[in-house]
Amino acid sequence: MSDNAPQNKAPAPESAPEEVSESQLLKVRREKLDKLRELGVNPYGGKFETTHVPGVLRANFEEEKTVRVAGRIVALRDMGKSQFFDIADLDGKIQCFLNQKAVGEETFEVFKQLDIGDWIGIEGETFITRMGEPTVKAVSITVLSKSLRPLPDKWHGVTDPQIRYRQRYLDLISNERSREVFKLRSQMVAAMRAFLQERGFLEVETPMLQDVPGGAAAQPFQTHHNALGMDLYLRIAPELFLKRLLVGGFTKVFELNRNFRNEGISRRHNPEFTMLEAYWAYADFEQMADLVEEMICSLAETFCGGLLIEHKNEEGEVTRTINLSRPWKRTPYVDLVRGAGGDDFFYLTPEGRRERCAELGVEVSPEMEDYEVVQQVFEKLVEEKTFDPCFVTHVPKELVPLAKQNPDNEAVVDVYELIINGVEISPGYSELNDPLVQRERLEHQAGEETQKIDEDFLLALEYGMPPAGGIGVGIDRLIMMLTGAESIRDVVLFPQLRRKEE
């Protein structure tokens, strides 16, 4: 069959000449839309049964096979009475060839009304051109969707971040790197789910609308339920409901969930984000640290080719290499703060610690309590400068009211905070299961706003919750670390943005 087909030539430039305005391009496409209808063709077709998808067909190519394949036209090479064109979907592309004599003038005229960006179904036979390119020779075509707007320049893609985030579909069409990141995200989330299920964890669902938002210290989004006549909140964490399940007898549970926090937006924060939370009865924070370390290393080895994760700039130069080799460092919080603030830091008076912060260039405000001043030193001088994995253990009890107090030091709780790439990726606790101590902690946290205490959760604890270990994993930040993304907006398909001004 290849003897009947000419050699495919190098593609011509696909961006429109600069002097052609957008309105002119839109007008031409509208005219082609009308022409298709005149030819009796529905420009927005329906069902088209396929035998293959473009990328898989090319990857597993065999000659002289009859195939039905569909995709978006991403390249066109007009050779008069013969046409070479590429069709693609998320997983790749395949070259197609259409000859006027083979398909007839009517079908060829239909094809002449198509542009880059249109969706088309092809039935044909596979062959390899003289240039060695796997190709489908079309015997029939089906128009599936006419694109009325030109796609972004193939060679430069979408470079404006605002367009990439607001019109993610254009980013996915033109930027292979974005497609790869979001495919990896989906595969990694599926792998985390399988990892836990293989170890006996049961996936559950808990409410997103909550009467009392709990499980974290954060500002919630508030709404109102008309039928019940009551205010409700989008959850800031699922923790308190998952612990109710431990009370009910579940011993290993997890939830991959969406959380919502009405707070700032930055390259590491989105008001709607994805978390994994898991609870394991009879375990402690050390076992949860082992579990998280094993899971993240498994992801890196499966999807990143090993435990060295390279972060690159836009020019492809390596700017940072994160080493996930095991075992990961585990260091007490106090030791890390001393290393940053001075060996005498905890021997200073509260006023002395504030003076030390000024010397170190760490900003603190007058209303901060002393433990918050210490935490500010930790965040600015330890967390933000820690890139290889570090489990920060035994943090002050004021920071984690839902964790079990350390038996040897009443000032700290049995907790880890996993820092990688300058941010907290995962907290893990030995969970507090004493209902009386839990009430004291929550009352202290709530202050005078006692309505923020979840009395139903405390009631559940009074029926007895087994000792347990718990973890949270920030999925968005984890994907950022594993893929080298510099902004959370690069790993969230539709990040929250300020409304575009007209």
Image (cartoon, rainbow, N blue to C red):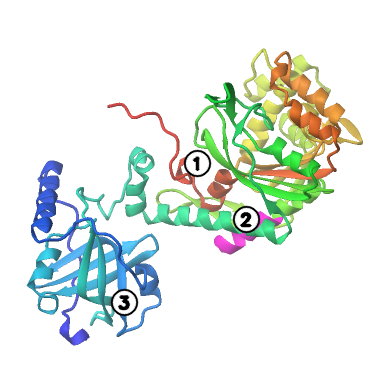
| Residue 142 seen in the current view | yes
| Residue 80 seen in the current view | no
Verify CB contact (< 8 Å) between mark 2 and mark 3: no
Task: Specify the label residue 67 is tagged with.
Answer: 3
Q: Which residue is mark 2?
A: 192
Task: Specify the label residue 132 is tagged with.
Answer: none
Compared to residue 344, the image places residue 34 above or below, namely: below
Disc nearer the start of the sequence (2/3): 3
The Cα–Cα distance between marks 3 and 1, rounded to whole angstroms, is 40 Å
Element under disc 1: helix
Q: Is residue 32 magenta?
A: no
Side of 387 relative to 126 (left or right): right
Q: Which residue is nearer to you in this view: 27 or 36?
A: 36
Compared to residue 468, the image places residue 445 above or below, namely: above
User: What's the magenta region?
Assistant: 294-306
Q: Amino acid at mark 1?
A: Ile
Q: Quadrant of residue 196?
A: bottom right
Q: Position of residue 345 (x, y in %)?
A: 78, 26
Q: Which residue is nearer to you in this view: 185 or 161?
A: 185
Q: Quadrant of residue 80?
A: bottom left
Disc nearer the start of the sequence (3/1): 3
Q: Which residue is nearer to you in this view: 187 or 376?
A: 187
Q: Which residue is mark 1?
A: 488
Verify CB contact (< 8 Å) between mark 3 and mark 1: no
Q: Position of residue 136 (x, y in %)?
A: 26, 76
- Residue under the point 61% across and 62% down: 301
Q: Residues within 10 Å of mark 2 (few under 14, many from 20)?
A: some
Quick one: quadrant of the C terminus?
A: top left
Nearest to viewer (mark 2 / mark 1): 2
The Cα–Cα distance between marks 2 and 1, rounded to whole angstroms, is 19 Å
Element under disc 3: strand
